[in-house]
Image: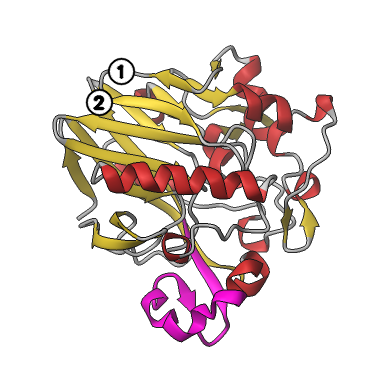
Amino acid sequence: MDTINLGDVEITRVVEWQGPIAPMPALFPDLERHGWRADGGRLTPHFWHPGTDEYLAAVQTWVLRSEGKIVLVDTGVGNNKERSYMPAWRHRDGDFLDRLAAAGVRPEDVDLVINTHIHSDHVGWNTRLADRAWVPTFPNATYLIARPDFDYWNPRNDIPKRGSVNGINARLANGSTFEDSVDPVHEAGQTVLWEGTSHRIDRNLTLELAPGHTPGSTVVRLESGTDRAFFVGDVVHTPLQFTHPDCDTCLSEDQAEAARSRIRVLGEAAEHHALVFPAHFPGAGAAEIRRTGSAFEVRRWAPFTPPEVHS
């Protein structure tokens, strides 16, 4: 199943890529003290490869149909982008737009694009290459970006970066992301740089700030009828962060703040029986969680069919 309905909102999963990112200990250095490998079987085969010790992830877009509008949550890696820190994402020539079309969405149909944060694997399809220039992929869409992220990653502001990817400082790893995937849509007049702690989209969807991974990391809250869902971006990377919510990745700009945001968001999700949609979960893609003391556990997985996409 690639599509489910929550209340009046239809949710479709479109996977661009999935595969190994980096060794688990490199990405989640704090997990070692928990001895997580003893219970690592819960992570296989979708989230961890025990033979190589690599973290497995999906890059995907969630298509929401709400109140007659088509909303994309994150836009993946994109094609033709220079991403030297991640060879599998460098100068891709993938079929994401065909997969989007198979979900019934043409670029001109998209009304809103939500970037949960400005990292290269969340904004890539904001733009496409046309006549050697980067142009908005979705010509009729408004792109919603949190102002703190826009200002933080804007190279003209020259703000030092603290996160790292494969040992490379986030400033270098994110490289030309702002210039090739954010600036063109802003210059085209298609961005709304929302400010404050929340931003209402419609009666079903609200944006909420959850800083730490980046200053403008955003959660998309869906509330429709009795159904709830939180699209949490990179607030959560692995199911191990349900059981160890204080553990963060080396990718975050402020690990302590990221942990605080994660504990708060997961607590609210558990309280409201909301499905949690992390950006990078392969397998079922989303889960309903419940509180167990100071941590959380999966109560049930969403009914999405695990994708068989490997590149």
Residue at the extreme top of the image, as rendered: 189
Residue nearest the viewer, comparing 295 with 27: 295
Q: Residues within 10 Å of mark 1 (few under 14, many from 20)?
A: few
- Circles 1 and 2, Cβ within 8 Å, touching? The answer is yes
Q: Could you say which quadrant of the image residue 53 lies in?
A: bottom right
x 42%, y 42%: residue: 265
Image quadrant in which the N terminus is located: bottom left
- The label number, if any, that marks residue 66 in the structure image: 2
Q: Residues within 10 Å of mark 2 (few under 14, many from 20)?
A: many
Residue nearest the viewer, comparing 137 with 179: 179
Q: Position of residue 251 (x, y in %)?
A: 66, 54
Q: Could you say which quadrant of the image residue 246 lies in?
A: bottom right
x 61%, y 42%: residue: 212
32 to the left or right of 283: right
- The label number, if any, that marks residue 202 in the structure image: 1
163 to the left or right of 263: right
Residue type, mark 2 in image: Ser
120 versus 222 height, above or below: below
Residue stretch rendered in magenta on the structure: 33-58
* CA distance for labels 1 and 2: 8 Å
